[in-house]
Amino acid sequence: MRKIKIGDRFIGNGEPIYIIGEAGVNHNGNLDLAFELVDIAKDAGCDAVKFQTFIAEDVVSKYAPKAPYQKALNGSQLDMAKRLELKFEDFKKLKIYSDKKGITFLSTPFDPRSVDFLDELGVPLFKVGSGELTNLPFLKYIAEKRRPVILSTGMSTLGEIEEALGTIQSAKNENVALLHCTSNYPSTLKSCNLLAIKTLKEVFDTPVGYSDHTLSLSVPSASVALGACIIEKHFTKDRNLPGPDHRASVDPYQLKQMVCMVRETEEALGCALKRPQDEELEVAKVTRRSIVAAVCIKKGTEIKREMVTLKRPGYGMPPKFLKFVFGRTAKRDIAKDEIIKLEDLK
């Protein structure tokens, strides 16, 4: 399966899980809070912190209704977007701050001007939200920047994903990864459909990850066990803050727990080869059975079934060699409970 390269590292099967802390718009339009979110993602152990870059009036019509999870907020969707908008100059500062902190800065663009800005800013990739999967002209515009693309697939069918990938790849950009996703905030466990990760891996020759919108800390680990190589999770400083995404986000402590659980799952997965682990080899010597003398056997005695038994430890002849013992003659005296070796018999 193809891998994508981000900076100096690869993402795909056999590579470390790439964890994106999704700050999104949980800064509430406040740059100081955005800086704090960078700190939280870094402290939690995320590989990257991601924001959302947009010019509200380029993205949202004044007639656009709000999504169900946004309806408790005052004003129209356009009003809400304007309140959550950061200036390009703010993102420059966030990029510098993230670089200083040693965490990769990412941001999802929602309009061509934001794409151009982020490209000039030098982001290592473009993350595209699920809502833009059917916006083929926009996908083509992003793909032509020749940067890797991570594409979320919430709300989509396999046919729509195929069309989106075809659009990106037609622009001679093969550096694409997919994120399985359920586009609701928060989404329910029942709607996760994590087995779709395996389907995406089988159908498309591209790395597949998971963008998690549940409040669960175990779902991301489960997705890793199913083959996800990227994890994206919304987080906030405080789930009680006003704004559209805070209640669908984890707090700093939970984010750190989730990262730890993902890393533990990653370490536990190992490889598909079934073989004894190094730490098992000494245990096998103690817990497996060997062929031993059930009674004292005098030299010259023909070995019969009732003279032998199977006992620990396991560093003698294994039980499957019993057939080579019966009918042979002892070449020496063998004490009861002593391991019988092949060289003891003739």
Image: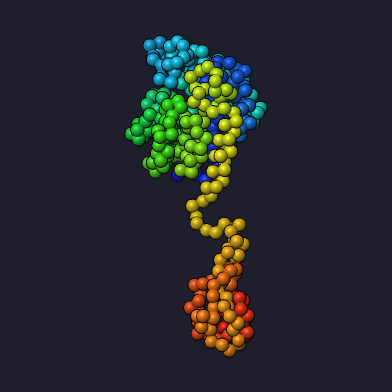
Please give the name of the residue rendered at 62% of the width and 18% of the height, measured from the top-left corner.
Answer: 32
Extreme-right residue of the structure: 100
Residue 290: x percent and y percent?
56, 71
**Please, is residue 277 above or below residue 176 in the view?**
below
**Please, is residue 191 above or below residue 74 in the view?**
below
Residue 288: x percent and y percent?
56, 66
Which quadrant holds the N terminus?
top left
In front of the other: 264 or 336: 336
Extreme-bottom residue of the structure: 300
Residue 277: x percent and y percent?
57, 57
Looking at the picture, the colour scheme in use is: rainbow
Please give the name of the residue rendered at 51% of the width and 13% of the height, measured from the top-left corner.
Answer: 83
- Residue 14 is at least partly visible in this image: yes
Tally of numbered tags: 0
Please give the name of the residue rendered at 54% of the width and 39% of the height, measured from the top-left corner.
Answer: 262
- Left or right position of 313 against 162: right
In front of the other: 250 or 78: 250
Please give the name of the residue rendered at 61% of the width and 57% of the height, measured from the top-left corner.
Answer: 279
Which quadrant holds the C terminus?
bottom right
Residue 191: x percent and y percent?
40, 33
Extreme-left residue of the structure: 159
- Residue 140 is at least partly visible in this image: no
